[in-house]
Structure formats: structure tokens, C-alpha cells
Image (tube, rainbow, N blue to C red):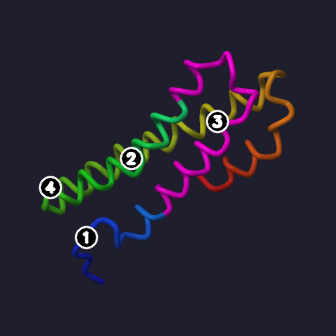
Amino acid sequence: MKYNRFEELPVWQSAIELAVRVYDLTVRPAFKGYYTLKDQLERAAVSVSNDIAEGFERGSTQETLTFLYISRGSSGEVRSLSYLLERLQHFDSLKSEILDLRSEI
């Protein structure tokens, strides 16, 4: 299937949903006082969809693939941060949501 716009890509649509879920999580009161962790998690989540879009818009298959791999790295960063959140006692009240988020990444 040929896609004309990055918004049509299922992987981009999933990445946007990931970012929305991360923002839904980080707006919770448990993140108050954990600004750098919150910021890093949000930035990594947003990078996933942005890298997919940037690679697609560059117009070549090779650049699209390159940016898909970069996006995959950002996804790994979100996943890694989810493990940190799971282990920090401060976020115990969000453990279920953190595990659900990780399963989507």
C-alpha cells in the first residue's frame, strides 16, 4: 500500500496514541516534583511520532527507514523509563497504568 501522508501510516497513528497515553499519565499528581523525569518521558514519547513524520516527509525510502530506527530508539527510551517508574516507590499508585503503557510500547 502506498501512503501519501504520514498521518495515514498506522505506525504514526500508534505513536500519537502513545504520546497521548504518556501525557495522560504524566498529568497525574504523582509526577509533581519529578519534573525532569516527567519532561524526559514526554519528550521521548513525542519524539516517536515526530521522527516517523520527519522521515516520511524527507521523501526517500532510505531516510524514512533511518528515521523509523530513530523512532524505535525513542520508543525504547519510553519503555526504559517505564521500568524506572515501576521501580520508584513514589509511583506505586500508578503501577497498573505504567504496566499497561509498557505493553502498548
**Is residue 90 found left or right of 2 in the rendered image?**
right
For residue 71, the mark is 2
Earlier in the chain: of badge 3 and badge 4, it is 3
| Amino acid type indicated by mark 4 | Arg
Spatial distance from mark 3 to mark 1, Cα to Cα? 30 Å
Outermost residue to the top: 33
Residue 19 image point, x, y percent: 52, 48
Spatial distance from mark 3 to mark 2, Cα to Cα? 21 Å
Spatial distance from mark 4 to mark 1, Cα to Cα? 11 Å
**Is residue 81 found left or right of 98 in the rendered image?**
left
Secondary element type, mark 2? helix
Q: Are marks 3 and 4 in contact (CB under 8 Å)?
A: no
Secondary element type, mark 4? loop
Residue in the picture at 71% in, 29% down: 85
Residue in the picture at 39% in, 52% down: 49
Q: Which of labels 3 and 2 is toward the front?
A: 3
Within 10 Å of disc 3 (Cα), the crowding (few <14, some 14-19, many 20+) is some
Secondary element type, mark 3? helix
Above or below, comparing residue 37 to residue 22 in the picture: above
| Amino acid type indicated by mark 1 | Arg
The residue labelled by disc 3 is: 26
Earlier in the chain: of badge 4 and badge 2, it is 4
Q: Which residues are magenta?
A: 14-40
For residue 5, the mark is 1
The residue labelled by disc 4 is: 58
Earlier in the chain: of badge 2 and badge 1, it is 1
